[in-house]
Amino acid sequence: MPTLKINDIQVNVEPGTLLLDACAQAGHPVPSYCYHSALTPVATCRMCLVEIKGQPKLATSCTTLAADGQEVFTNSKAVADGRAGVMEFLLINHPLDCPICDQAGECKLQDYSYQYGSGDSRMAEPKRRYRYEDLGAKIVIDKNRCIHCTRCVRFTREISGTGELIVANRGSELEVTTYSGRTMDENPLAGNVVDLCPVGALTSRDFRFNKRVWYLKPVPTISRHSPMANPIWADVDQNRLWRFRPRPQGTRLSTQFMLDSERLAWHRYDLDPARRLATPLLDGAPGTLEAIAARLRAAGSVAVVGQGTFGCDAAQRLGDLASSPDLRYGSGDRLEPVQFPTLQLSGDGIFNRRGFSERGFRFGHLEELLARVKSGEVKALVLLHDEEFSGRTETAKLREILEAVPFSLLLEPIPSDLAGTARLPVATYLEESDFVINHEGELRRYQKALEPPKGVKPLAAWARELAAALHEAKV
Ligand code: SF4
Ligand code: FES
């Protein structure tokens, strides 16, 4: 294990560790633009310069391995001068449009300019000018802002494999663009280049000019549209959702990037409060939980169907409503096409199948439930459902069960056209805290990001109240 000194602090690192990571380990992180743990290092930006004792020139820490006995300095005068020079060079053509730039507030160029820049520019010549270009419907490029770090270009070659971005021309004419007007529309991972761009050169059509990022509060949550329930940030402001972003777990590749379909799924949860159910419904009219509980109790034997895309707490509470343990059925059959096996570790879109199974829910037995309903053994059904995760066949089966059962209670955060006797206003997963257990057995928590509208409650809360009302009715 190499032992080295960084600013006189001794550190032991794993063999093969980059100096850039060793510096971070020692508590002296160095600034960087072009380096990304998932991409091949190219050392184009020169921002990560450090001084190594005995070497005549500054070295790029993103391409230098930590070695035994090295003495490294990240805060010497030579390093400070080197960084200031690099910043001045990178800013030569960069416009001063931070007030209208989407990246302002999370821009490394802005941050490092304050920390390491000189505050002055000796650039007397006019800056190079380009007009912004659409790279299709998803991405817009503003080449004036580009610092040619090539992260985006390497991403399309090494991760998405689509290779549509290139570096064209040379010298002061250097520009990132696409081959003969190709767009990024065919790239299912296109949105990641916006996250990767350390400046505001690549922007998202979906988010562009919508919000200043310093107003946004990032809340740790999960992607329901990833079979591994990948960790993501939900950026919220004033109880509204504005975007989803990946929330990387260390250098784990599968958590670094997200599909555009997952990224844009935030629109699905940005619900208009005025159009949401605010009170329980019974027989198509406003009702009460007590009245629903009374009907449920009167109906007799209760089965529950829980879709494995909800939290484990919800599953537990829902399971408690079943008249017997064998009346807990699992649902959900969405399959995700696996296009990028290193990022998509499963194709089973029912990401909490394991959490529901551990709580006694049996998947693949809806036919059995239908038979038990038709035979009169099961008289009532509580259905926890999200239409997005049930295919046509399963939905048809659920419809058949609902038509056959004498009493049904629907729990749908986003109501579908399924019909039941009663319905409760249920919160979306962004309006509650819970956890899931993904296909690899990892527990993934999500926090409440939004306050539900008046009358809307988390599923677990409704199920708890329902269980109490049922119990009271029995006493
Ligand atoms: S567009 Fe952004 S990510 Fe791509 S090279 Fe320019 S600065 Fe880097
Ligand atoms: S991060 Fe090392 S040269 Fe760019």
Image (tube, rainbow, N blue to C red):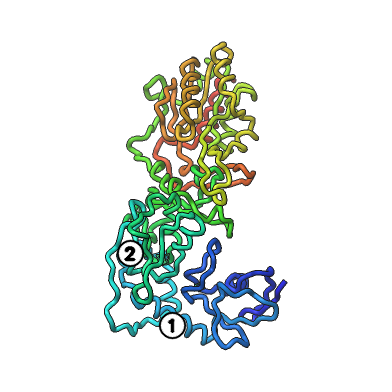
Please, what is the three-letter code of the amino acid marked with disc 2?
Asp
Most extreme residue toward the front, as rendered?
A: 180
Circle 2 SS class: loop
Disc 1 residue crowd, few under 14, some 14–19, many 20+, Cα 10 Å: some
378 and 308: which is toward the camera: 308
Q: Position of residue 153 (x, y in %)?
A: 44, 63
Which residue does the image show at 63% across and 44% down from the upper left? 440
Tell me: 468 left or right of 102. right
Circle 1 SS class: helix
Does 23 sit above or below residue 75? Answer: above
Please, what is the three-letter code of the amino acid marked with disc 1?
Gly
Does 103 sit above or below residue 89? Answer: above
The residue where tag 1 is placed is 85
User: Looking at the image, is mark 2 or mark 1 nearer the viewer?
Assistant: 2
Does 242 sit above or below residue 374? Answer: below
Question: Is ligand 1 within 8 Å of the beta carbon of the residue shown at mark 2?
Answer: no
Cα–Cα span, label 2 and label 1 = 24 Å
Disc 2 residue crowd, few under 14, some 14–19, many 20+, Cα 10 Å: some
Q: Position of residue 410 (x, y in %)?
A: 46, 26
Which residue does the image show at 54% across and 77% down from the upper left? 60
The image quadrant where one finds the N terminus is bottom right
Q: Are marks 2 and 1 in contact (CB under 8 Å)?
A: no
The residue where tag 2 is placed is 142
Q: Position of residue 192 (x, y in %)?
A: 45, 56
Question: Is any part of residue 355 visible from this angle?
Answer: yes
Q: Quadrant of residue 23?
A: bottom right
Point out the tag, 2 or 1, that comes first from the N-terminus. 1
